Image (cartoon, grey):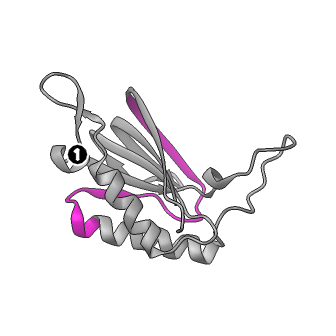
């Protein structure tokens, strides 16, 4: 599983002209399942991203997590994070999970996140989404959990 975390002061997802998910300060997380991923990897990735210390403490050091700040969490499915870009000028998406597995794992992460965090919004799997954000910092991290 792959997550691209972006610390934001605000973010939103629009589908067909309607806002379907929006947060104020917190994390926008682009989420991707790869072939071989299971709920085990999804749970490990969620635990890591909820506890990842990307927010400033009183001294301005990144020592506070999303759980510490109670910021918003906007989860957006994005299979293109699994792109293989090693050769040529067109990405290959063979490393990505099948659409069925991707949807199942995305829904699993959303359910688990909502059970563990008070403010969780989402994008829409398979939709043409318009994502806007104000990256705070900018602060962006790539997290990946591989099947064992």
Query: Which of the 4 image quarters holds residue 126?
Result: bottom right
Residue at 61% across / 58% down in the picture?
A: 79
Q: Residue furthest left?
A: 58
Q: Position of residue 111 (x, y in %)?
A: 34, 72
Asked if residue 4 lies in the magenta stretch, the reply is no
Q: Is residue 147 left or right of residue 22?
A: right
Q: Is residue 134 magenta?
A: yes
- The location of residue 78, given as percent across then percent down, is 57, 55
Q: Secondary structure at mark 1?
A: loop
Q: Position of residue 64 (x, y in %)?
A: 21, 39
Name the residue: 54% across, 47% down.
Answer: 130
Position of 112 relative to 132 (above/below): below
Q: Residue at x 76, y 45 (%)?
A: 85
Is 90 displayed left or right of 132 in the figure?
right
Q: What residue lies at 30% left-to-right and 37% top-to-bottom?
A: 54
Q: Closer to the camera, 38 or 15?
A: 38
Q: Which residue is mark 1?
A: 71
Give, as a single range, the part of the protein colored magenta. Answer: 114-136
Image spot of residue 47 (x, y percent): 32, 59
Residue 12, relative to residue 148: is it above or below? above
| Name of the residue lying farthest toward the top | 59
In the image: residue 107, left or right of residue 79 = left
């Amino acid at each position: 599983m792959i997550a691209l975390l972006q610390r934001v002061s605000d973010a939103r997802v629009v589908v067909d002209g309607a806002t379907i998910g929006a947060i104020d300060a917190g994390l926008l997380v682009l989420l991707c399942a790869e072939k071989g991923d299971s709920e085990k990897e999804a749970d490990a990735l969620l635990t890591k991203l909820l506890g990842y210390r990307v927010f400033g403490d009183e001294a301005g050091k990144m020592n506070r997590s999303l759980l510490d700040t109670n910021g918003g969490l906007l989860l957006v499915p994005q299979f293109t994070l699994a792109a293989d870009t090693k050769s040529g000028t067109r990405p290959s998406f063979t490393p990505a999970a099948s659409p069925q597995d991707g949807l199942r794992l995305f829904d699993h992460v959303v359910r688990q996140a909502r059970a563990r965090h008070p403010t969780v919004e989402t994008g829409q799997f398979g939709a043409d989404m318009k994502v806007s954000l104000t990256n705070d910092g900018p602060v962006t991290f790539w997290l990946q959990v591989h099947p064992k």
